């Protein structure tokens, strides 16, 4: 048998958590972690890319689970449901 017994579980450097309500008058946001450290709030995909670049991470594919893990939605989820 040449198949691996355990599935591949990616551990990406970038983790974008679910949408949180913003303060009154402010838009919702998602908490962002890089290398296990909270680095701030992201309100758009551009915020995610800028934060990654500031840590020296070049993101070529936002849908690659080995690069970015989206929790509670995908790269298009920026509002509360």
Image: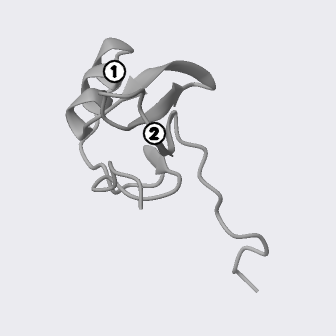
Tell me the tag on residue 60: none
Q: Position of residue 22 (x, y in %)?
A: 41, 32
Residue receiving disc 1: 51
- Residue 26 figure quarter: top left
Which residue is most to the top?
54
Q: Residues within 10 Å of mark 2 (few under 14, many from 20)?
A: few
Expressed as whole percent of the image width and height from the top left, the position of residue 40 reads: 45, 19
Q: Is residue 38 above or below residue 62?
A: above
Name the side, left or right, on which 6 lies relative to 80.
Answer: right
What SS does tag 2 mark?
loop
**In the displayed image of the protein, which residue is found farthest to the bottom?**
1
Quadrant location of residue 81? bottom left
Q: Residue at x 59, y 52 (%)?
A: 10
Eyeballing the image, is 10 above or below 1?
above
User: In front: 51, or 28?
Assistant: 28
Q: Which quarter of the figure has residue 44?
A: top left
Q: Is residue 9 visible?
A: yes
Q: Check disc 2 and report the residue beneath it.
A: 21
Of residues 41 and 33, the one nearer the viewer is: 41
Please name whichever residue, 81 or 31, is drawn nearer the observer in this view of the structure: 81
The residues tagged by marks 2 and 1 sit, at their Cα atoms, a distance apart of: 20 Å
Horizontal and vertical percent position of residue 73: 44, 59
Q: Residues within 10 Å of mark 1 (few under 14, many from 20)?
A: some
The N terminus - image quarter = bottom right
Give the mark nearest the N terminus, 2 or 1.
2
């Amino acid at each position: 048998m040449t198949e691996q017994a355990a599935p591949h579980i990616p551990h990406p450097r970038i983790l974008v958590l679910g949408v949180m309500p913003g303060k009154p008058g402010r838009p919702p946001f998602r908490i962002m972690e890089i290398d296990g450290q909270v680095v701030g709030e992201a309100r758009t995909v551009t915020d995610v890319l800028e934060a990654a670049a500031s840590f020296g991470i070049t993101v070529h594919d936002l849908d690659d689970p080995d690069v970015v893990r989206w929790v509670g939605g995908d790269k298009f989820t920026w509002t509360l449901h």
